[in-house]
Amino acid sequence: AQAHIDAVSKSRALNCFITETPEFALAQAQESDARIARGDARPLEGLPLGIKDLYCTKGVRTTAGSRILDGFTPTYESTVSANLLRDGAAMLGKLNLDEFAMGSSNETSAFGPVVSPWRRAADPDAKIVPGGSSGGSSSAVAARLCLGATATDTGGSIRQPAAFTGTVGVKPTYGRCSRWGIVAFASSLDQAGPITRTVRDAAIMLRSMAGHDPKDTTSVDAPVPDYEAAVGASVKGRRIGVPKEYRLDGMSAEIAALWDKGAAWLKDAGAEIVEISLPHTRYALPTYYIIAPAEASSNLARYDGVRYGCREQGRDVSEMYEKTRAAGFGPEVRRRIMIGTYVLSAGYYDAYYVRAQKVRSLIKRDFDEAFASGVDAVLTPATPSTAFAQGEKGSADPVEMYLNDVFTVTVNMAGLPGVAVPGGLAANGLPLGLQLIGKAFDEETLFSLAAAIE
Ligand code: GLN
């Protein structure tokens, strides 16, 4: 724990942590030492982890990367972080993220952007983004500031930052982990998961994080398997679907080559590769950017200057609300709230929100049919490009940033598990990631396949 605390304090230039909690980590590590000495060690004894600052932590400031939560210190612990602490983990601090997890580069955080430890060969001074929204998590793990980190994924926020930093990211099935105590973005899409350096570490961490929680009615009451046992298990005879609709027009040759390489690795390990069709793929991104902002606009209504954090003065209550929300939310969050309230408003609800929900069902049905045809998992690239430099994407047109999520949002729309696993380096020296998508509650197959790629 001390070695990691030192590494954290030497790497502040990366801006991974919003809040460091070294005393906390040391106290927990001492308890771990005592338990180990007594011979009753727990599964994660003394492991130094970072917690994305979207998870409420008892007695430790929680910001969601936003000014609107200024001064908010939860009196309770999120179920997932409580599970990790119960199993002996030591919390090094709270990790930076895009504001309310809205973003793909960690540039929307009110606490400044996070820098990736990776360098681009041609211009090593450029500050490379670690992906988002879990950019503090991915950068901290890649920079070896923590052994693993919690993250959340609403449309790709675990898998895309993992792909950008050469780490492993697991977005479990919707309902696998409790969302209780995690600041809500889009409740029907949000899911907690780990970012780690290896597939095995992710399996170990997820086992602690997962499980039924009576406080989250969408968490599923099913036993949590021993995911670690699936790491290294044979993938012989597994059928892997390669969806032709993901071969987008204008896909770079490098990404296409990565995808072929991934398929070849799995074939070498004994799997069978088959082409499949997921015909509604092209509607996933536009549909996501209706549903996610709709749910966000509702979830973020609670930040009214009364219940949490910052409050601006106004002549009356309405003016206080307006001023508080104008001062507390950054531009991306305000954009999402405006889109969300628009698509939910009386005249547009049927045209946008209801229609998007119908398309969502079709996207899910595409996967159901692929799995019903005998496919065990689906292989795609995790992202359409490598990481980019700060300021390079999305500043003129937010849609350019949204395009990062083309390969990842389908998984959230269908509620399925997805894993990002490193697939080697691009010509620019930055990592590339592959994505594996599994059947609901079949994370074990994904761990086996990801380990075969790793
Ligand atoms: N980048 C996507 C967005 O901005 C996904 C974010 C996430 O998964 N939290 O909405």
Image (cartoon, helix red, strand yellow):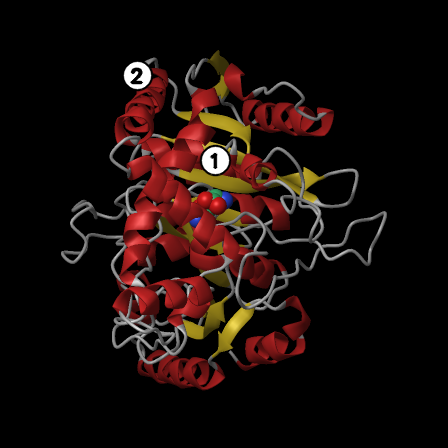
Which three-letter amino acid code belongs to the residue tagged 2? Ala
List the residue tagged with mark 2.
372
Q: Looking at the image, which residue sits at the far right? A: 122
**Residue drawn at (44%, 61%), measured in percent from left and top?**
329
Q: Could you tell me residue 342's position as x and y percent?
A: 35, 39
In the depicted view, which residue is nearer to us: 419 or 357?
Answer: 357
Q: Could you tell me residue 3's position as x and y percent?
A: 58, 78
- Above or below: residue 228 compared with residue 377: below
List the residue tagged with mark 1.
408
**Residue drawn at (26%, 72%), measured in percent from left and top?**
306
Say left or right for 407 vs 219.
right
Quadrant the C terminus occupies: top right
Some atom of ligand 1 lies within 8 Å of the CB belonging to the residue at label 2: no
Some atom of ligand 1 lies within 8 Å of the CB belonging to the residue at label 1: yes
Say left or right for 374 vs 141.
left
In the depicted view, which residue is nearer to us: 106 or 336?
Answer: 336
Q: Could you tell me residue 175's position as x and y percent?
A: 25, 45
Does the residue at mark 1 contact the one at mark 2 (Cβ under 8 Å)? Answer: no
Q: Say whether residue 441 is visible.
A: no
Q: Which corner quadrant of the image does residue 269 belong to?
A: top right
Q: Say whether residue 33 is visible.
A: yes
- Above or below: residue 237 compared with residue 195: above
In the depicted view, which residue is nearer to us: 223 or 177?
Answer: 177
Of circles 1 and 2, the one toward us is: 1
- Above or below: residue 246 compared with residue 433: above
Instruction: Assign a secondary structure to mark 1.
Output: loop
Say left or right for 133 vs 84.
right
Q: Residues within 10 Å of mark 2 (few under 14, many from 20)?
A: few
**Residue drawn at (56%, 35%), measured in percent from left and top?**
403
- Calculate the distance from the C-alpha at mark 1 to the C-alpha at mark 2: 21 Å
